[in-house]
Image (tube, grey):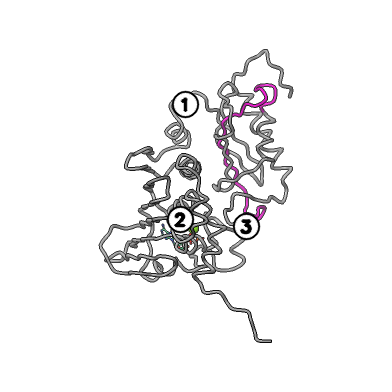
Amino acid sequence: MPDIINLLPDAIANQIAAGEVVQRPASVVKELLENSVDAGSTHIQLIINEAGKVLIHAIDNGLGMSETDARMCFERHATSKIATSEDLFKIKTMGFRGEALASIAAVARVELKSKTADAELATFIHIEASEIKKQEPISASQGTSIAVKNLFYNVPARRNFLKSNPVEMRHILDEFHRVALSNPAISFSFTQNEKEIYQLPAGKLSQRIVSLFGKNYQKQLITCQEETHWLKVQGYIGTPEFCKKTRGEQFFFINNRFIKSSYLNHAVQGAYEGMIQEGQFPFYALFIEMDPIHIDINVHPTKTEVKFDDERSVYGIIKAAVKQALGTHNVTPSLDFGS
Ligand code: ADP
Ligand code: MG
């Protein structure tokens, strides 16, 4: 019997990997914005057309890439963020897998422009289905611009699976909110179908919350802070009177990375017990800081799930912190919410 096993060509391997990393336009938005944050940008511009189905374009003023790196960034497992397996235990950047750009370039038409501070010219690269079609020096200012066009143009099944523009736009906004909230020192602008929908100046977290969600948040935010020798929590929670009927505005960040955790959500929700009714959800944006040695963020490629080595203690500290914050707020005296 002849040998029958082939090593898959890169383009196919990338396309398979893209299935996990790039589920929808919002996944691309997340990866591009996080790369711009990791590059030390102070301003990030996001341009979206047709809910990202036609164009997702991120422009930053970060470190930029050299000519070689501008090609390398589209290779799978190519990253400047980790080098050794020890590095995996002390990740400070949003990215580290080196998969995003390779995956995106496998399922879209991508145009990159990038320039470092010391280079005279920028590098332009046009890549389609993992194949570099054009590369040339051009003039541009420092930073990186990545335009992702016609997402899934070569994967009809995926393209057909995309939801309506309003639904895909909702997912994009969710990702944008998460990145904008966790980086208030970076200014952002966001243009959708040629219309500017956000212009966020750099500032403090409370200002960012207000410019993202509305002026009426200003008076409804309570500072939340707690510190133990191994964990720090800080951020804002909404007043009990300011609850919503949906969970949309509840955010946990661990070491500045947005995470989903129904377990920790339960801790916060529990702290409000007696102050809010069933089916009501308070606003919160809580930032947990701890030594990365205690967490594993490598659970899923999209990195929104984490594992803690001591989940129960984290739960307890969060709940206590929120309770204490609510205690400092002038709650309706007639409500008995225990101690
Ligand atoms: P990761 O972020 O996990 O390293 P990516 O595929 O997202 O993997 O990016 C690959 C590499 O390309 C990054 O490690 C970084 O060196 C470079 N890169 C990507 N986007 C930018 C950007 N906006 N500015 C500067 N460098 C970038
Ligand atoms: Mg990345």
Q: Is residue 220 above or below residue 189?
A: above
Residue at x-position 62% and y-position 37%? 226
Q: Residue furthest left?
A: 139
Q: Residue at x 48, y 37 (%)?
A: 205
The magenta stretch is 272-299
Compared with 174, 14 (above or below) is: below
Regarding residue 43, the answer to whether it shows in the image is no
Q: What kind of element bears circle 3?
A: loop
Mark 1 residue crowding within 10 angstroms, few (<14) / some (14–19) / many (20+): some
Identify the image quadrant of residue 128: bottom left
Res 228 → quadrant: top right
Q: Is residue 205 magenta?
A: no
User: Mark 1 or 3, which is nearer the eye?
Assistant: 3
Query: Would the CB of label 2 be found within 8 Å of ligand 1?
Result: yes
Q: Position of residue 218 (x, y in %)?
A: 47, 26
Query: Distance of mark 2 from mark 3, alpha carbons?
Result: 17 Å
Work out whether residue 144 can be spotted.
Answer: yes
Q: Whole-percent x and y of residue 193? A: 35, 42
Q: Amino acid at mark 1?
A: Gln
Residue 219: x percent and y percent? 49, 23
**Which structural element holds mark 1?**
helix
Which disc, if any, is residue 44? Answer: none
Image quadrant in which the N terminus is located:
bottom right
Residue on which the image places disc 3 = 298
Q: CA distance from mark 1 to mark 2?
A: 30 Å
In this orientation, which residue lies closer to the viewer: 257 or 58? 58
Of label 1 and label 2, which has the lower sequence position?
Answer: 2
Left or right of 321? Residue 47 is left
| Residue 35 image label | 2
Q: In the rendered image, which quarter is residue 147 located in?
A: bottom left
* Secondary structure of the residue carrying numbered label 2: helix
